Amino acid sequence: MDPAPAVQLDRLTKTFRVRRSRGAGMVSRLRDFVHPETHDVLAVDALSFSIRHGERVAFIGPNGAGKSTTLKMLAGILHPDSGEARVLGLVPSRQRRELAFQLGTVFGQRSQLWYQLPPRDTFELLGRVYEIDAVAHRLRIQSLTRLFELEPFLDTPVRQLSLGERMRCEIVASLLHGPRLLFLDEPTIGLDVSAKATIQALLRAESDRDAVTLLLTSHDTGDMEKICDRVIVISGGRLLWDGSIVDLRRRYLTSKRVTIWSETERLQIAIPGVRTITAAGYRAEYDVALNVTTVGHVVDAALKQGSIRDLAIEDAPLDAVIRALYATSATAGSSADVAASRNADVAAGLPPSLTLRRTAEASAEAGQARPRERTTP
């Protein structure tokens, strides 16, 4: 395994110059044409992180956060204004051709397959594109076909395949040349639950088998949890969070939701830090603040009133945790932090069991994620 990281970003920065309209009138449009007014939009702002070989990382952020711009710089499509990026030991902006032979991409909403041809023909064509030895390429197709179970439809035109079957072929097409790094953009979008689980399991298996580094961008938190072990969150072009999904939950969750099915028709639990959400018909649901009390105290209090038939203890879903992180970023540094934080919670539609840890450290980190603009005449 290479000692250097698979991906290394050091204060990567990218700015776009955008025209600003003076108005809708004829005079304003003429002035815009003769002497345009522009402003610089900072899309990526001194972004730094690294990814080890074989890691599976979710790279996420709200719309306009700078994800696409960052990925384009990693692929060599865009050149950074400043800072440095190295991917698999190469500088993408200067060594794009060499890097292309070591990268694979899977786009859930774009296809690299020829719709009128069966997958087998597309695979053969891609072998020519990547200049792969014919014998080695044939063995690679056979290996991936068995692994992804493509035999039943390998000779069926792509236009006749189901979405799940097509996505399996898309992934195989991206893996044929043996990439060391795979970019995944919404790889399971539109799939049913069964097909989605299959794709997620296959991606993890391929990463484990060949130590392929996965970089996933997705709004589907199920993909993040099932495929990735680490999450990088950016907002306003700056790093907002970099750590494991488990740590993300632990930091931004200070409560749990406890549901109790009891022999007692209506439980009465009055413990500081415990809020009753519903309590009727032998079923009660509570929001438990873990910094005040424990789930065990709630269960003990319920047992004193009667037998428990069933019990469920849940965290907030990951998408709510991520919305909470975005809300923290949006409200950090405000002159009325407490009020703004509450308003952000409501606006984000967070569930009652989710409580944000708005510490000084978290606010300072989130405050760095604000987008900045420079105006030029």
Image (cartoon, rainbow, N blue to C red):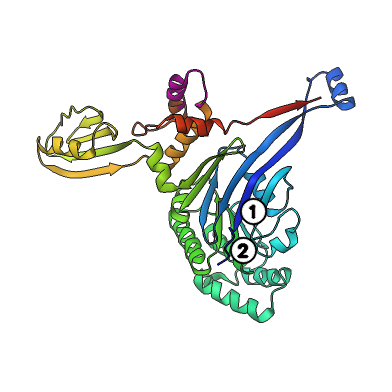
Q: Position of residue 302 (x, y in %)?
A: 14, 36
Residue type at mark 1 is Arg
Q: Position of residue 334 (x, y in %)?
A: 52, 21
Quarter occupied by residue 173: bottom right
Q: Which image quadrant: the N terminus?
A: bottom right
> In this figure, which residue is indicated by the disc labeled 2?
174
Q: Which mark is residue 110?
A: 1
Residue 61 lies, with reference to residue 113, above or below; the image says above
Q: Is residue 317 visible?
A: no
238 magenta-colored: no
Q: Residue at x 62, y 61 (%)?
A: 159
Q: Give the distance between the C-alpha atoms of the residues marked 2 and 1, in whole angstroms.
A: 13 Å
Seen as rendered, the residue at the extreme front is: 3
Q: Position of residue 270 (x, y in %)?
A: 18, 27
Residue type at mark 2 is Ser
336 magenta-colored: yes
Q: Nearer the viewer, mark 2 or mark 1?
A: 2
Q: Is residue 365 visible?
A: yes
Q: Is residue 227 left or right of residue 353?
A: right
